[in-house]
Image (cartoon, grey):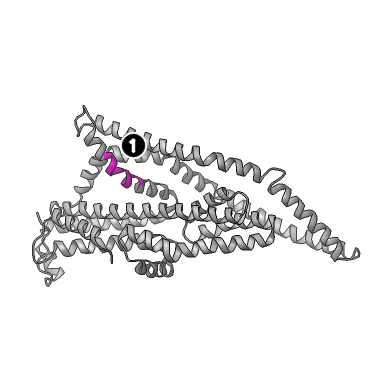
Amino acid sequence: MPLVLGNREDCVSEQWESWPTRTRVRTVAIAVVVIIMFVVLILVWSAIVPFLFGLVLAVLLLPPVNWLQRHLPFLAPESRVARLIALLLIYLAGLGVIVGILAYVIPTIINETQALFSGRGLAGQIQTAINALRRLFERVFPPSIQPLIINQGRAIAAELLGAAQGAIIGFLASVSNALVVILGYLVVPIWVFYVLYYADQLEEATMKLFPPTFREDILNVGHITADVLGSYIAGQLLLATIVGILSGLSLALLGVDFAALLGFITAVGDLIPTLGPILALIPALIIAGLERPILALWALLALLAVQQLENNFLGPYIIGDRVRLNPAIIIILLVIGGALWGLLGLLVIVPLFATLRDIYRYILIRTGREETPPSEALRRIDEIQKGRAI
C-alpha cells in the first residue's frame, strides 16, 4: 500500500488527525522508545562501540550471505541449513582472505621490525645518539656547573616520574572499562554470526513495531542506508590502501629504512580521522632522523605531500565517487562536520549527508502528485545513484 501523505500542501496536523488512534499511539510509543534507546546508547557508548562496528559488518555481509543461500545446490533456498552453510562459507572465505594478506604482509613486517630493534637498528642508533649527547654536554658546559645541571635534570625527572605515576594510577582505574571493550570486540564475530543467521526473524520483529502502511518504506530506508554506508566504508579502505602504498614508496625512494613497515602503519593510521595520519608520521620521522637529520625533513615533506594529495584530491574523488557526491561538496562537508562535532563530525558527516540526501529523494518520489509504490521509488533512487552525483 502506498504511503499516504496527501498533496505536499497538506498540513502535518491534518495528516496526524487522519491516522487512526491506534496508529498515533503506536507512533508516539515508537518515538519514546527511540529517544530512550538514544539516551542509553550515550550512557554506555564505550561498551557499545564494538557492537556498532559489528552491526556495520553485518550490514556489509548480509547481501553476499543472502545471495549464497539462494544459490546453494541441493538445498532449499529458504532452509536454515542453507543459511548456516552460506554463513560458514562466507566466514571461511573471510578467514582465508585475512590469512592470505597476513601471510604476505606479516613476514615483511616481522623482518623489518626485527632489524629495527636489533643491535644494528634502532637500539644501536639510540645508544649512539645518547653517547653523542653526553660528549656534547661535557664539551659545552664547564666541569664546575655540570653537577648543578645534572641535579636540576634529576629534579625535573622526579616531577615527570610523579606525573607518570598519576597517569598510571588513572590508567589502572580505567582497566575495567577497557576489559569490557576488549571483551566486546572478542565476541563481535560470534554476535555478527547470530545477527546474520537470524536476520529474517530480526527484520520481521522490527517491522512489527511499525504500522503495516509504513513497513515497506522502512525496509527501503534501511536498504538506502546500508547501501550508502557500505559504499563509504569501501571507499575509505581503498583510500587508506592507496595512501599506505604511496607513503611506503615515497619513503623507499628517499632511502628511509623499514619503508614497508612505515607504509603499513600509515595505511592503518589513515583510517583514524585527523589524529591517525599525524600519529603515523612519528615513527617515520624518528627512524629517518636517527639515520640523518636532513632525511627526517625530506621524509616529513614527502608524507605531508601524500596527505595533501589525499585531503584535496584522492579523498574527495574516491569517497565522492562511492557515495555519489561532488568532491567540492565533500570538502565543504568535512569543514562543517569538523566545526560542529570535531573528530566525530569528520567521520560521520559524509555518510550522514549522503544517506539523508537519498532518503529525502525517496520521500519526494513517494509523496509526489503521482502515488509511486515503494518498490518503484526505490528503483528510481538506485537509478539516480548510478546516473549522477550532486
Q: Position of residue 216 (x, y in %)?
A: 16, 52
Q: Position of residue 36 (x, y in %)?
A: 32, 56
- The local crowd at label 1, few if under 14, some if 14 to 19, many if 20 or more residues have their Cα within 10 Å, is some
Q: Quick one: SS at disc 1?
A: helix
Q: Quadrant of residue 62?
A: top left
Q: Nearer the viewer, residue 204 or 113?
A: 113
- Left or right: residue 195 versus residue 99 is left
- Left or right: residue 1 versus residue 173 is left
Disc 1 target residue: 90
Q: Position of residue 366 (x, y in %)?
A: 14, 61
Residue at 67% x, 58% y is: 289
Residue at the far bottom in the pictured view: 9
- Left or right: residue 17 versus residue 62 is left
Q: Position of residue 248 (x, y in %)?
A: 54, 53
Residue at the far front in the pictured view: 253
Q: Is residue 380 visible?
A: yes
Residue 288 located within the stretch drawn in magenta: no
Magenta range: 57-65
Q: Quadrant of residue 111?
A: top right
The N terminus, quarter of image: bottom left
Residue at the far right in the pictured view: 144
Residue at the far top in the pictured view: 74
Q: Nearer the viewer, residue 237 or 305?
A: 305
The residue type indicated by label 1 comes to: Ile
The C terminus, quarter of image: bottom left
Q: Nearer the viewer, residue 12 or 301?
A: 301
Q: Is residue 44 visible?
A: no
Which secondary structure dominates the residues rendered in magenta? helix
Q: Quadrant of residue 134?
A: bottom right
Residue at 29% x, 31% y is: 85
Residue at 25% x, 29% y is: 81
